[in-house]
Image (cartoon, rainbow, N blue to C red):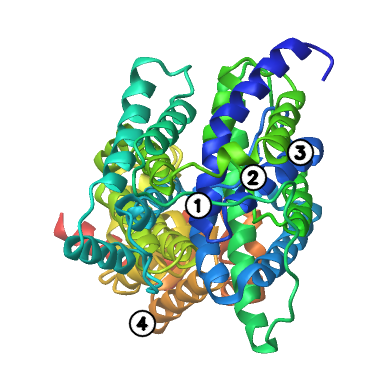
Amino acid sequence: MGRSPRKDLVAGLTVAIVALPLALGFGVASGAGAEAGLATAVVAGALAAVFGGSNLQVSGPTGAMTVVLVPIVHRYGTSGVLTVGLIAGLLLVALALGGAGRFMAYVPAPVVEGFTLGIAGVIGLQQVPAALGVTKGDAENVVAVAGQALADFARHPHPAAPAVALAVAAVMLVGARLRPGIPFSLLAVAAATAVADLAHLDVATIGHLPAGLPLPSLGFLDPGAVPHLVTAALAVAALAALESLMSATAADAMSASERHDSDRELFGQGVANLVAPLFGGVAATGAIARTAVNVRSGAVSRLAALVHAAVLAVVVFAAAPLVEGIPLAALAGVLIATAVRMVEVASLRALARSGRGEAAVLALTAAATLAFDLVTAVVVGLAVAGILALRQVARSARLQQVPLHDGLAPAEHHEEERALLAEHIVAYRIDGPVFFAAAHRFLLQLAETTDVKAVILRLSHVTAIDSTGALALGDAIGKLERRGILVLAAGVPDGHRRTLDALGVLDTLQRQGRVFAQTSDAIARARTELRTTGVLADATARKGTDR
């Protein structure tokens, strides 16, 4: 933190200016109030900076988290938020101690993009009542809430709130394109507040804020609520882990030499989520937008994030009266613009062009986010992505008949004998993974082999095999042998022997000495056995008679 304090001070102040309207907006959007958003930005921002695994990460309330918290606040109040935060914090610490940070890298890109797109849609729809200046309905689904708000506005239209929201969103979106370094969100909110006050516009405002960090009102929860709160805490922990690690990875990509520690980052977010609710805050994560501003403003250490938290603490303790007059419609405009900026059109187009499967995963994840909840959306996205991945892997597995002479020395046999062997012996090479999604498809083809006396299975190109694939292979071998066809195996990888031996797939072949390291040895054994049974001798005699 002592490397370049001046740069960190400037960056921290810049991030605080950007974070102030977002903290207020996300606090209001969560249902816990603007003061809860500020408390989260101060407490979680400072603790995650100290204990987290990234030098450049900035944490606080985020739009994705408000999506989870809205129904909790609505049903259980601040006691429910406190409980969820504490459980989620413990889960994050447990994930950190268990070394789970590395597994977050396995979430497919279409799931992340679809998740982000769905969250952007949810955030935008959540702001419709405040942007229109109507009371939020009691529906839980955001689409229904937005529809109800539009119907209420149509019955009693009043243009002040929509005008404020649209003006703030337009200033932010246009200003970000023209001058990205200027905090247009704060300027737009300040201008909207001044205009609303001077023109005496009939718009709802934030209202009274406590002179300090608000303490939660602790009450007794209905025991029947505990399972639902635990489920919500699982969603909060998963979301905090995913979003924080994504943000930390983005910070690494934007900086020259920084590399975050995933497990320490999870630990820092766990500590932040354990403590923030005790000061009236809500659940927090690493914030991609604020982290990006921090990096672009020249931050070089954790001091910048600490300065950001300190500046917001000053606002809480000294400038609360100035904040109380901010119109809710202005904050709705800030969040609508934030939702629009969350959508990376170029990334969506690239994924859509990469294949129908990728586009389907993205679309289903986004739709599930809007229709259900974030946990369901992630589960749906991962399930569909997993099914498509299995399908792709299964297609890569194949059974291929290969020329028999590939396994023979060039001068070992004359052409007539090679042709004779080829009439009675066939060699198949199994390529790729032999597992439950692929085994039956091509091993059925193997079992239906006809008009040969011996089959050589070349297994050296098998990349993976599971119990289902091994049993299917054993079944195919059994069917061939029951039809009197001699089966030999060659090139069994050492890594697959454990599975094959445990299920006894090659036991019979091994007892009869028909498992070989080299294909040429298998061909030689097949030739010997066919001569012993008279197959090759009779064929040779017939060939001589024909001549």
Q: Is residue 150 left or right of residue 462?
A: left
Which quarter of the picture shows residue 483? bottom left
Residue 412 against residue 153 in the figure, above or below:
above
Image coordinates of residue 401 in percent, x first then y, are 32, 54
Estimate the spatial distance between the alpha carbons at disc 4 and disc 2, rounded to whole Å.
77 Å
Name which residue lies at 40% across and 15% down: 179
Residue position for label 1: 64
Which label number is shown at residue 483?
Answer: 4
Residue 288 against residue 114 in the figure, above or below:
above
Marked residue nearer the N-terminal end (2 or 3):
2
Estimate the spatial distance between the alpha carbons at disc 4 and disc 3, rounded to whole Å.
74 Å
Pointer 4 local density, CA inside 10 Å: few below 14, some 14–19, many at least 20: few
Closest to the observer, 329 or 479: 329
Find out whether the residues at labels 4 and 1 contact each other: C-beta distance under 8 Å: no
Tag 2 secondary structure: helix
Image coordinates of residue 241 in percent, x first then y, are 63, 51
Amino acid type assigned to the residue bearing label 1 in the image: Ala
Residue 141 against residue 40 in the figure, above or below:
below
Estimate the spatial distance between the alpha carbons at disc 2 and disc 1, rounded to whole Å.
17 Å
